Image (cartoon, helix red, strand yellow):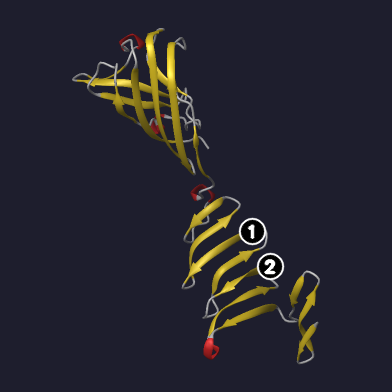
Amino acid sequence: VELYYNNEKKLSTTSQGADIQSENHAAQIRLRTNGGTERGSVYANNSNQVGILDEGGNWAIQHENDSHTQFRIANVTKARIDGDGLKFNSDTAAANAISDYEEGTWTPSLQTTNNNFSGTQNTQDGVYIKIGRSVWIFGRIERLGSVGGSGNVQITGIPYASAHGGQYESTVTWGYRTGVGYTSLAGWVSTTSDRLNLAYNNSSGSHAVPVGDFASGSHWLYFSCHYYAAS
């Protein structure tokens, strides 16, 4: 079936559906409600742009083939998706794009700075959320019996490598814990080893926790951290 207006073909049906055609620079399907009020339209032009126009004829969703898609309200760009990821407002800088969102699990594990931790780790639970390069991790470890090794206590296994440099040494927050004989625990992300360091505070400052300070028995360690990933 073919439909013509003023001797120009405007619509034709095919085995796959229907084709809208224009001999001008643009093709448009207007959407109207009762009384003939135009509410918007589907639009494409010869500049490889296709999308949806609002009732005023301005782009609401504008897609440029093989380039980007913009979302607008009242003809003001609010979001853009391109090869870099998601950008907000009129920003086009690659460094400001959000290119990733993930949720997942990871396995935290006790270790020492000398890589010789010994002991039974009965429960090792971890979850994470990653938005762009920001990573939020949550974890808990249950250890049983006695512990051994030398050096200071660390936790390994973070889901993404940290950005390197002192400005990225994010703090670790410790929640419920037993078997660690300090009332004030601290911690930070080692940006050279991608591990969480366990520390304690006293009147003279912060100090690393040696593995020998872990008590024997069944004990728990809950923690969370927000850090900046390398990529």
Residue at the spot 81% in from the left edge and 71% down from the top edge? 15
Q: Residue furthest left?
A: 203
Residue at the spot 55% in from the left edge and 72% down from the top edge? 59
Please, what secondary structure does the residue beneath circle 1 have? loop
Q: Mark yes or no: residue 87 visible.
A: yes
On the image, which quarter does residue 228 sit in? top left
On the image, which quarter does residue 1 sit in? bottom right
Residue 208, position as x, y percentages in the image: 32, 17
Residue 192, position as x, y percentages in the image: 46, 24
Q: Mark yes or no: residue 110 visible.
A: no
**Foreground of the two, 43 or 175:** 175
Tag on residue 67? 1
Which badge, 2 or 1, comes first in the chain's sequence? 2
Tag on residue 201? none
**Foreground of the two, 128 or 83:** 128
Q: Amino acid at mark 1?
A: Ser
Q: Residues within 10 Å of mark 2 (few under 14, many from 20)?
A: few
Q: CA distance from mark 2 to mark 1?
A: 10 Å
Horizontal side of residue 182 vs 12, given as left or right: left
Q: Are marks 2 and 1 in contact (CB under 8 Å)?
A: yes
Please, what secondary structure does the residue beneath circle 2 have? loop
Residue that carries the numbered disc 2 in the rendered image: 48
Residue 210, position as x, y percentages in the image: 34, 12
Say above or below: 201 vs 128.
above
Say above or below: 40 vs 167.
below
Q: Residues within 10 Å of mark 1 (few under 14, many from 20)?
A: few
Q: Amino acid at mark 2?
A: Asn
Horizontal side of residue 71 vs 83, given as left or right: left
